[in-house]
Image (spheres, helix red, strand yellow):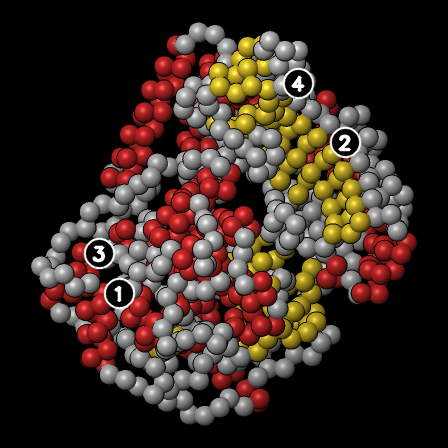
Amino acid sequence: MSEDRMDRDIETTKQAGSTGPVTSDAYLELEPGSVLLEKYKVINLLGRGGMGSVYRVEHLHLQKQYALKFLHKHQADDAAWRRFETEARAANKLDHPNLVKVHDSGLLEDGQPYFIMDLVEGESLSEMLKNIGRLPLEKALKIFIQVGFALSYAHSNGVIHRDVKPSNIMIASTNTEDAQGVLVKVVDFGIAKLTRQDEFNQQTLTKTGEIFGSPLYMSPEQCLGGTIDKRCDLYSLGCVFFEALTGAPPLVGDNALATMMKHQSETPVSLKEASMGIEFPAKMEAIVAQLLQKDPQLRYQSAQHLTADLIGLDSGQASIFEPLRPKPQPIMRRNTHNPYVLLFYAACWFFGGTVVGWIFPHPPATKESALKLAATKEDWVDVWNPTSEQSRAVEIAKTEAEKNMLELEKQPGFFSEPGSKAGERIFNFPHYEIGNLIYSKRHRPPAKEKQIFQNFEGLTFAPSEEFQKHPKLFKKFRSDDLVGLDLQSNAHILNLNEKDMSSANTALYGISHLTRLQMVDLGDTIITPGGLAQLDKLPNLKRLLLTRINLPGTDIAKLRCLNKLSHLKMVNLKDIKPVIQKLHTSKNIFSLVLTGCDVDISDLKMLANMKELRILEIADNEQLNDDAMAFLPPQVADLDIRKCPVTSKCAKHLLRLRNLRTLRLDSKGWTDAEITALKKRVTNTTFFDGGIQR
């Protein structure tokens, strides 16, 4: 975690009317090497400000590093304690790969409140933009899709960020070559809401000593200090997205007040115009424009909807939602002035100027504005509300897709036919899209209309949700048409309900005739034991991906095909032991992923019996310490032990792996000298260091 970001995390602006500067006596100094609460060893100071301090610490039992945050003594009044406690409670409520998790909280020995959170190391989006100016579209999409996941999850748990800006988006891991290694963390959830701090040399607005946010990224309604909801975060995200793509925020005034006035009344230029002529896809222009609508009713109504559109743009697919228009807003006035502008000027007139900033405890309550605010406070359309016009539009679109699938079921014959040339196969898909054909992560053309393949060796198909609901449609593929089937769902990370995640289970009952199938991906789906058992009917299945599915290991272990697999991926699965017990005699497993599956030493001992195992990913398993590394299968060539509590003490065990060619680990528990020494001993091994992209 960079000191620059940590300073912004905890630094407080000097308040109007404060009694004087804070002295160093108010700070609790923690000595490196000291031990807190008999379990946290202090490593070094990460940042310090008016509110509190943040230290890097190591958990002595887990041998894992965290960030320790605590209040300064001069902040230890009842109000500060309540804010701090609320912040910790809110952060602890959120558990998502793209958010920072709080693991522990309480009081230090001298009575000061603290909490322990994930240690995020990397650079902020603001730092990245300082260095490179603007992001390529592809990389921006990779980053903002993950930001969308984070906001979607937080909003669904009742948490609004209120301070979405580049400095609060951390890029924990990057791979500049293909942008696939990006792991994004949205930080400071609840900080802006609870402490209103911002020290990133941004224009700031104060309210009796508290900062609302950064005017460069504040929504029109937030500038007024009125009631806000999750759409406020989406406007701010639109400002950040605009800056990431063009190199500058959409609206910049000479000072904080001028910037906020622009947010009330000025429409940003297009991405193309702001970037001096760079062409962007029309859909990208439309997404940002909708995020930056002045009226919350005209913006995206949920982060889920936004993220679905970004995924569609990134993958070349249509959104899982149809384009939606918001519910018309009741007209509460007769004049043509922007009500936000009127409220803004009224607020300025009422409170006047101050030396420190502009104070907005409440917007002035005229009868007209009160009616306006009352009408908009909770009267907005959520795409997930089944009674809303938007949801009805989605249902109409789904009904149309359902009709298409029913008609397709009635049509005789196969999708494919042999061509006139040797090895040629011609597919005649319907004129509408039924899914995607997967050639690579980036190349996923729609499965529609006529397509001709030379030297045909089989397709990998990702059927649409509606297609999956009709298992009979799979019969339109010949037995050797498909070699791969991608049924993974975005519904889990978009917080959709279970029926949107279970269509894959229905699809499984239609694929038994696809005897050439070698790969099935069931990531983020809800599967029944009966649906999973359909995989045993596929004679050539070699690769199975079970990332975050609902079934425990006891059900997966019942698969008869397990010992025939060469590649098996399991992430965040419960009760993994029965699976490992069944696999330990496998003569076919070449690649095994057990990320975040609570693997322990006894499990690792069993893996040593897999003679063909060459790729082993056991990242994010807190019980796999230095001693556990003694039981690594000696034939492994590719090993991932990131986020396992290992130190340089495990080096002697790693040196036993004579075939090791790729090693992924967290070097933060190692000194530079120790890493250098290890690299010298394993000269043919490539090292990777950083976060896990699941």
Q: Nearer the viewer, residue 584 or 4?
A: 4
Residues marked 1 and 3 touching at CB (< 8 Å):
no
Left or right? Give the position of 571 relative to 278: right
Q: Identify which amino acid the numbered label 2 is placed on.
A: Phe
Q: Which one is in front in this view, the residue at disc 3 or the one at disc 4?
A: 4
Q: Residue at x 49, y 62 (%)?
A: 247
Q: Which mark is residue 95?
A: none
10 Å neighbourhood of mark 3: few (<14), some, or many (≥20)? some
Q: Identify which amino acid the numbered label 1 is placed on.
A: Ser
Q: Earlier in the sequence, mark 2 or mark 1?
A: 1
Q: Identify which amino acid the numbered label 4 is placed on.
A: Asn
Residue 576 place in picture, x, y as percent: 66, 36
Where is 28 relative to 247, above or below?
below
Residue 354 place in picture, x, y as percent: 30, 86
Q: Is there any visible trace of residue 71 in the rendered image?
A: no
User: How far apart are the alpha carbons under marks 4 and 2?
Assistant: 28 Å
Residue 535 place in picture, x, y as percent: 60, 20
User: How far apart are the alpha carbons under marks 2 and 1?
Assistant: 61 Å
- Quickly name the residue at label 3: 376
- Quickly name the residue at label 2: 590
User: Looking at the figure, which quarter contains the N terminus?
Assistant: bottom right
Would you identify the image quadrant in which residue 458 lies?
top right
- Quickly name the residue at label 1: 265
Q: Which mark is residue 455?
A: 4
Q: Residue at x 76, y 55 (%)?
A: 646
User: How far apart are the alpha carbons under marks 4 and 1?
Assistant: 59 Å
Describe the element under mark 4 as helix, strand or loop. loop
